[in-house]
Amino acid sequence: MSPEPMGDLTAAGGHGAVPTEGVPTSTPAPPAAGDRREWPLFEVFVRSRRGLSHTHVGSLHAPDAAMALRNARDVYTRRQEGVSLWVVPAAAITASSPDEKDAFFDPAADKIYRHPTFYDIPEGVEHL
Amino acid sequence: MSEVGERAASAASRLITAGELSDPTVGYVLALADDALVAAQRVGEWIAAAPQLEEDVALANIGLDLLGQGRSLLGYAGSLMEPPRSEDDLAYWRDERAFRNVQLVERPWGEGDRDFAVAMARLLVLATYLHELWTALRTSADQTLAAVAAKAVKEVDYHLDHARMWVLRLGDGTDESHRRMQAALAGEWRYVEELFDTTHIAPALVDAGVAVDPMSFRDAFDRRVTTVLREATLDVPEVTPAVTGGRRGVHTPSMGYLLAEMQHLARSHPGATW
């Protein structure tokens, strides 16, 4: 389930780091006998109930998307965690790089006026 | 009496013999239960031994579904007995001759090493059969069987989908995977006929709408399996059916080992809970 070491990782570590190289895309060549690392990596997203968005829960290997969806059902929704599943080839995700972290994210740090903390939130409004 | 002697005497008095299972309804429900229980025990052997971690989990789920079906049915069969018996009594305190499962589900996963193609061939046959069986039993005159069937049919539909996915990929994959899938299918196919053996089902049960005659869905079974095999570029095997007798308590040599592993703990520590 965890990403096997192959190629560089561009996302900032942790579960769901996205390899940029060596990940076969949707129609991989048949794997050589005994070589399991040829199976592409898929990222799994689960919608826990209607009204919420799909949330990334982890990743897995599968020979193709149809099998990935079924593996995801068995691995990630066996305790009724969801009502809908997405699987996305990890290779299809373009991720920000740790090298660009400062340029990407630090400029937002001192702009507190972008937070809605200066407004009163009406009662009964959730998920704001 | 020594402790060992006492244990042996206590074990002998707990054993349920085939003679106590002569009621037609008990016999019918037990055949259904034992198919599920023994299949679950074998499928469990794949946990931590499947080709991929994801497949370990998938097969564990399938085994647990089958175990759940077996438990419901064993409990029901036990409740029909006089005196009533528990699901554990029936699972752990019967010997080989009192088990009514088909030989399809008790055999090891290939000779020597476990063969994943054998697992998928068997699952395709079993799940297709169970899909038709549970679909028909949903309208059984027996309320308990109908309720078990309504739940089980959704579970085996997924098992069937899983087996189909793999048989398509292995059959229509590489030369090697095609060859091994075809060989596995030939091995399992010898045990298909026994699924449609009706000699253990009392005709009165079928007439009363309690039991389903499996021959009533033989055509549907053949059509469904043949469609998958064709799509997977596999041939329907032409093999001589094995000489079987699981419904009468006649099993293959592997059954004793399977039961020994399944029953050992419960028999060594009777009544133990955790």
Image (cartoon, coloured by chain):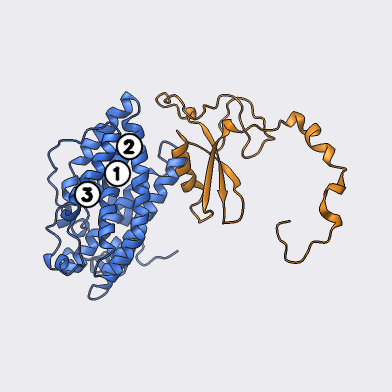
Chain colours: A orange, B blue
Which badge, 2 or 3, is on the more N-terminal residue? Answer: 2
Q: Could you classify mark 1 by the number of other residues whose Cα lies within 10 Å: few (under 14), some (14-19), or many (20 or more)?
A: many
Which badge, 2 or 1, is on the more N-terminal residue? Answer: 1
Q: Quadrant of residue B64?
A: bottom left
Drawn side of residue A18 relative to residue B61, left or right = right
Residue B2 shows in the view: no
Q: Which residue is mark 3?
A: B220
Q: Could you classify mark 2 by the number of other residues whose Cα lies within 10 Å: few (under 14), some (14-19), or many (20 or more)?
A: many
Q: Which residue is mark 2?
A: B167
| Marked residue chain, label 2 | B
Residue in the image at 25% along x and 66% along y? B140
The correct choice, above or below, for B38 with respect to B170 in the image is below
Q: Are marks 2 and 1 in contact (CB under 8 Å)?
A: yes
The numbered mark at residue B225 is: none
Q: Which residue is mark 1?
A: B124
The amino acid beneath tag 1 is: Leu
Residue in the image at 42% along x and 65% along y? B273
Distance, label 3 to label 1, CA atoms, is 14 Å
Observer-nearest of B182 and B57: B182
Distance, label 2 to label 3, CA atoms, is 19 Å
Give the percent coordinates (x, y) of residue A119: 84, 58
Label 2 sits on a secondary structure element that is: helix
| Marked residue chain, label 1 | B
Whether labels 3 and 1 share one chain: yes
Give the percent coordinates (x, y) of residue A20: 61, 27
Observer-nearest of B204 and A52: A52
Residue A96 shows in the view: yes
Drawn side of residue A64 relative to residue B89, left or right = right
Distance, label 2 to label 1, CA atoms, is 8 Å
